[in-house]
Image: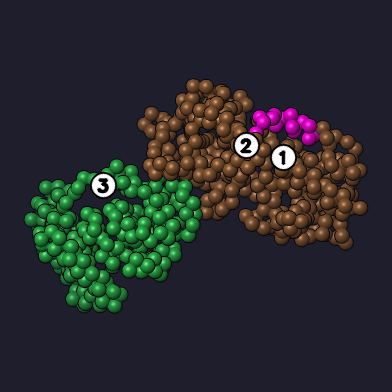
Chain colours: A green, B brown
Amino acid sequence: MKIEIIEKLKEDVRYKEALTACMNCGVCTAICPAAEFYKYDPRTICNIVQSNNVDEIEDLLNSETIWYCGQCMSCKTRCPRGNVPGMLITVLRKISQEMGYFVNSEKGRQQLAIKRTVGENIINAGYCVHPDIVDPDLHPEQGPVWRWFINNIKEVSPKMGAVYHQETAGALRAISKDTLDEIKSIFKVTGGEEFYKKIEHFSSEKAKDFQSNADYDYMIKVYTTDSGDHTR
Amino acid sequence: MQHFDTIIIGGGPAGLEAAARLSKFDKHVLIIEKDPALGGKLLLWDKLFPDFASSEELLHQLIENIKNDNVKVSLNTGIKEIENEGGLWNIIDNHNNKYSAKALLLATGFDVFDASRKEEYGYRIYPNVITSVDLEKILSGEVSHAEPKKVVFIQCVGSRDEKVGNHFCSKNCCICAVKQAIEVKEMYPNSEVYCFYMDLRMFGESYEELYRKAQQDYGITFIRGRVSEVSPTYHGQVQIKAEDTLLSRPIRLTADLVVLMVGMEASEGTVEIGKKLQIGGNYDYFKSKNQHLADNLTYLDGIFVAGTSKRQMSIPETMKDAAAAALEINNYLN
């Protein structure tokens, strides 16, 4: 199983694009916004992947660290060797999700919440983010105004130029069934559907450790749990 | 049409040294220099690594060595045309003078990397970000600067950097920063001096010793990490961001003066002639025939190359290379 990690890594086209030969200058970490707050060091991740040490790479897949990256790709703009640590992270995340390592870290377990929100929104609503699904309970960072907006969305939308659930052109418009069916078939053909099933599968296996069955409460629990041990 | 045994294009250390050597072989030489004075990039430096020798004295000696009847100098002169005719190289300069010679020595040197191309370091944006060349003028007293409390040197500006198309190491900046850091510390003994590097390449004689002296005797702090950006602070200083890669820790440092160690690139003249004669190689430097066996020759009969028009070199290396070129040319002419 372990050797599969290296195989999966090397067959991913993004890996080939993301890492040639890192010289450990640290400019990626120096520019990285995540590294300023989290216990996170993109240079070290490049270094570990470059080492080909399967045990250390497996540790990464189990770790919190690969989930700290915000995918801003600032590292790409600076690397003097043309590496893209941020893209390397996407490959490691994918392997962690596909092989089920993600449930072994607090930040990794939150993949379930992302799959059920943004991930399912695309398929069910045709939107990644849509006010209907940005639940005020899940997003306290939106502040009290957000709840008021959700409660009054029908009245407020036209004032903002949005066409909430209307079958016409514009923001927040309804997405037609044809379009949604097309999105669904794209997900099926490209393996997205299978990928979502894996997230659910590994999450429900893990939920047993918490005497749960990966229901909504479990999702909220993993989404809101914070050990407080992520920042520098 | 004036005829010479050899025409040397470029009146920097390589051109001057080759001219002096050839004149001793009793060859008639013309040096064509685009600038109003001889010396090339030597004129930009005050003291030289690793022994703090005066560049002015060195230049004075180099010019003394060519003061004889065999050497003529044409300043303020650019090259308009170079053509081969019956085994002779004909040159027309920008004043429409015509010369010919059996051998041409190209010693067109390097240009200093334009630091404003690395926009993230803020050169020409923040007044307290300067280059190693600017610092020489402060060290020599030509330009005055308020006494800085904290000085940061940033290595590899324009070198070892795919983002500006220069994969190569400029090789002189490491030791140059060590020299300049010591000079800054001598000029401002109360200042704190930091140097950010990726690797320190102390390849030359007594370079490593000078590096050690900088650490031991002058208390200069060397931090391994490439600086990602320089930004202004509210109080008119600048803040640099880097990772201390040996401690795996991102750091910020506020400085009064940031010195960018600018690298070397093929000079404008080198690029131009390289294209004209089709002898340009990597990064538009001249390509010699064989780096090991025929490093002063090119694929064109009678065209010779020396010094930093070929690749990054220190001054002693340049002078030795020029001497070797003079020997090759002398053999060729005989």
- Marking on residue B316: 1
Q: In x, y percent, where is residue A3?
A: 37, 67
Q: Which badge, 2 or 1, comes first in the chain's sequence?
A: 2
Q: CA distance from mark 3 to mark 1?
A: 53 Å
Q: In x, y percent, where is residue B328?
A: 83, 51
Front residue of B196/B162: it is B196
Mark 1 residue element:
helix
Q: CA distance from mark 2 to mark 1?
A: 13 Å
> Would residue B239 be counted in the magenta stretch?
no
Front residue of A101/B290: it is A101
Q: Which residue is mark 3?
A: A230
- The residues colored magenta run B50-63
Q: CA distance from mark 3 to mark 2?
A: 43 Å
Left or right of A24: which side holds A149? left
Q: Which residue is mark 2?
A: B207
Q: Which residue is at a point 40% across and 41% down the rendered structure image?
A: B247
Front residue of B16/B9: it is B16
